Image (cartoon, grey):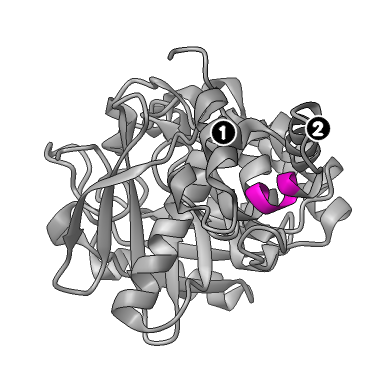
Amino acid sequence: MEDKKDIRALTKEQLRDFFVAQGDKAFRGNQVYEWLWSKGAHQFEDMTNIAKETRALLETHFVINHIQVDQMQRSADGTVKNAVRLHDGLVVESVLIPTETRTTACVSSQVGCSLDCNFCATARLKRMRNLQPDEIYDQVVAIDRESRLYYNHPLSNIVFMGMGEPLMNYPNVMKAIEKITSEEGLGMSPKRITVSTSGIPKMIKKMADDGVKFNLAVSLHSAIESTRNKIMPFTTNFPLTDLRESLEYWYKTTKSKVTYEYVVWRGINDNREAVDALVKFCKYVPCKVNLIEYNPIDDGEFQQASEEAIQAYITALEKNDIVVKVRRSRGKDIDAACGQLANKS
């Protein structure tokens, strides 16, 4: 039946109303809601404390459009990559990144990507559609299970750095985070969640106005306009002056530091001018910088910069009291590292 509604698109109130309209008790809606979210039921027959007739009634009216982990790959360094099949057959990827002290889920927000960053494999896939809140939520649940199974502890952090630009799917990303942080969902602290954007000023201001409690990361990669436009062509519509103003607004409104994600490439941004421009940009709002090891995606244009070039960034940033960390890539052998998610499977 094509016209069955995805039950997870309903609020708890709507579920309660549905049962009242069927001549049942409203609290039945609460029970079903709990099964759908905190217990992660994949099908109605899993709902063991609900009468058979009631489960059959749900089956008649609704579907649970659950994700399936189609293929799981484990890297030599312990990273796990999931190819996640959606109810309509499309596939996205999500990654579990373990360290000594924590496990991080890197989740996708779109099938493909709306943007056109030249160095990213995901950007070469056209955007098929936005993910629904439950599809984002399910990726987190799957990785939490894997974290418990392989590393004996629950998931500790979430980054929206998988496929897609989260701020181009804003309402659904916000609803997913609301469920992830809700006591009726996974009960995770928003402080353990980071949303990473390529820098869409209007949406950064909207997040600030909406009073979000999670962390913001910006994929910057160059604080020189012409270089940034070349490597991320869409940024011609979002100049650095607009980005800067939105980040100043973000900090003034939320008092939350910004993290800049920054890859250094040979012959592109590994010179003194690029270093100085980043240091200057970092002084506008309190921030920290993650220098990310680059993972080539097959052609020769983008190559990892030398250790000396990276050290030049570290020295200059530290000299100006800007916190800087070098992020070594994880999961490269299974194409699970930054910028490599391209559904090769």
Say whether marks 1 and 2 touch (CB < 8 Å).
no
Dot 2 crowding, Cα within 10 Å, few <14, some 14–19, many 20+: some
Q: Position of residue 265 (x, y in %)?
A: 29, 50
Provide the secondary structure element on which disc 1 rests: helix
Indicate whether 163 appears above or below 147. above
Mark 2 highlights which residue?
17
Q: Which residues are magenta?
A: 28-33
Q: Circle 1: is it few (<14), some (14-19), or many (20+) Cα within 10 Å? A: some
- Quadrant location of the N terminus in the rendered image: top left
Q: Residue tagged by mark 1?
A: 58
Tell which of 114 and 14 is nearer to you. 14
Residue at 32%, 76% (x, y): give it.
149
- One can see residue 291 in this view: no
Question: Whole-percent x and y of residue 35?
Answer: 58, 54
User: As shown in the figure, which amino acid type bears the numbered disc 1?
Assistant: Leu
Q: Residue at x 87, y 51 (%)?
A: 253
Between residue 24 and residue 13, name the one nearer to us.
24
Q: Position of residue 277 (x, y in %)?
A: 55, 50
| Residue 199 - label | none
Q: Main secondary structure of the magenta part?
A: helix
- Residue 116 % position (x, y): 39, 26
- Total number of numbered discs in the rendering: 2
**Extreme-top residue of the structure:** 2
Q: Amino acid at mark 2?
A: Asp
Residue at 43% from the left image edge and 50% from the top image edge: 139
Horizontal relation, residue 199 to residue 67: left or right: right
The quarter of the picture where the C terminus appears is: top left
Residue at 34% from the left image edge and 57% from the top image edge: 95
Q: Secondary structure at mark 2?
A: helix
- Lower position in the chain sequence, tag 1 or tag 2: 2
Asked if residue 94 lies in the magenta stretch, the reply is no
